[in-house]
Amino acid sequence: MKKEKTKNVTLEPIAEADRVPFKEKLAYGIGGLMDGGGVSMMSCVMLAYMTKNGIAMTLASTIMMIAKFWDAITDPFMGFISDNTRGKWGRRKPYMFWGGISLLLCIFLVFLPVREWGMSVGGFTAYIILMYLLWNTCSTVTQVPYCSMASDITPSFRERNNANTVKLVFTAIASGLGYVLPLVFIEALTNPDGTGFLFVPQLSSTQFWLCMSLVFGTLFGGGLVICGIFVKERIKPKTPKKHFNLKQFANSYAVPYKNRSYRWHIVMYVTAFICMDIISALAVYYATDVWHGYELFGMKMSSLFIIAPMMVAAVVMFPLARVMMDKKSKQFAFRMGLPFYIGGGIMLAAMDPSWAPPILVPIVALIMGLGFGGAQMMPWIIFPDTVDVAEMATGQRPTGTYSGMMTLARKVGGGLGVGMVGWVIGALGYVSNDSNDPAAYVQQSDAVLLTVRLTLGISVAVFITIALIASFRYKITSAKLTRIRYFIEARKSGKALTDEESAEREALIAELYGKVDPADVVDPTVAVDDEGNLIESAPETDIVEGVEDAIEEIAVTDDEIAQNEVVDVENDDKTTVLPKED
């Protein structure tokens, strides 16, 4: 295995134009409320909401799968639209602003209490299919452009890390709210005792609808509107906008996966989040069916005793993950707690209410959260680095396509995971509540209860192990990123590289991207205006200034060098990056 040698250069300040003011970082973070809480909200509540309103488990799972197949079309298409949008508002912001408003309206329709108003189960099934597809479409319109902002907010990877860290504080809060509050509301809706749950009294279907719509519509939709108004796009498109071509669009599904670093990143991301989707979907059944009749702290066993401790542990782990990201690497911060995640999942599956005390449930969930924190935090911090690799290799920066495929993989993976859970449990005889009272309790068979436990444990063990392995195959480091940014700006300017620099660039491409298809390579020195029209040439002085700004980023401290397994080499007062022989 070859390792790199790199230089120790004087640390220069970040270019002023690349700095993101703290107020703007806050606005960017607020936009992440939907990113952190939208999918988690639907994952933990939608399956239970449908089955408690009379839809069979297998059919409810199929509905969720239909929505994900719809995403397979809309997510990449939205990425193409966003990448090829030009205007004074930028490529991403218009969709966040108007999409945020549409989300606020859409969530009111999804949870409309039509069953309470007399709609049959068949009518409700057709209604929820249409509304769930509408919700996923509105989510796509906002989330693909918003996720692209993780890369487009600034060319400085240090400032990106800072901005994305602020964002992750908000996504962590939203994730906690998205997992916990819907479970509180659904417990208050379905509690057969009629006593409500925790601080929420017993809810009717109408009250449940208003709680879900007002709370999450305001948080998710309002956050995106704020982000669309106040956040700037500092990376401008350097290539002409493309006209839609169906064949090229179909081929665009594969483009991001030519990037080796992106592939391993997607494996890390999807497996970690599939696991959480499965846990959140099963939590209601694990608590209310497997542990039915048991109490903890004077309350009936609830899914909250699983999700809340995980969220608390995750929040505690976020600062540690941020420190480890700086001292070690992003992939190390991702994987450091995963063994706890695996062990906790297996323990939840092994515990039988006949011998295990109920207090073990939140304790084990807390242990799982030690791994959940890093797995939840790091993928979107890693994502912009994979786009940098693509730009170095091809001259293109198709952030929208990359984020579109990332959100698609997330949604399809989660949908398949939750869908398989529903199909397995449904096939073994899960009995849905087909009465008009969502609070009515239905006793499940021992086979179903055992399946819920085993599905939870096996899913965690398998998916998190895959994520752990993938993190060791992801090779981008901070030291490599400084060189990647140098080569990107040098290529944009037409600056000639030395033979040693050319060899270094090719080595980085081979390691981090893989084989480059010549058809994917573009000339980034071609200038375009805000509408995507070609300009004959860009002023050379502007190009040189761009390189000078990039050079300010070609600086790493001794600590950064050490943490990425690199060493200093002095060569006649010049320092170069050379391959180190095994």
Image: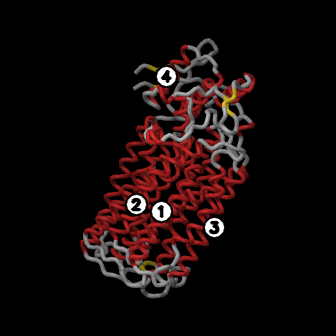
| 188 is higher (above) or lower (below) than 286 | below
Q: Mark 2 or mark 3: which comes first in sequence? A: 2
Q: Secondary structure at mark 4?
A: helix
Q: Which residue is mark 2?
A: 66
Report crowding for label 1: few under 14, some 14 to 19, many 20 or more residues within 10 A (C-alpha). Answer: many
Q: Position of 194 compared to 223: left or right? A: left
Q: Foreground: 39 or 5?
A: 39
Q: Mark 1 or mark 3: which comes first in sequence? A: 1
| C-alpha span from label 2 to label 3 | 27 Å
Q: Position of 148 compared to 358: left or right? A: right
Q: Which residue is mark 1?
A: 133
Q: Which residue is mark 3?
A: 218
Q: Which residue is mark 4?
A: 506
| C-alpha span from label 1 to label 4 | 44 Å
Q: Mark 3 or mark 4: which comes first in sequence? A: 3
| C-alpha span from label 1 to label 3 | 20 Å
Mark 2–mark 4 contact, CB under 8 Å? no
Is residue 479 visible in the rendered image? The answer is no
Badge 4 amino acid: Glu
Badge 1 amino acid: Leu
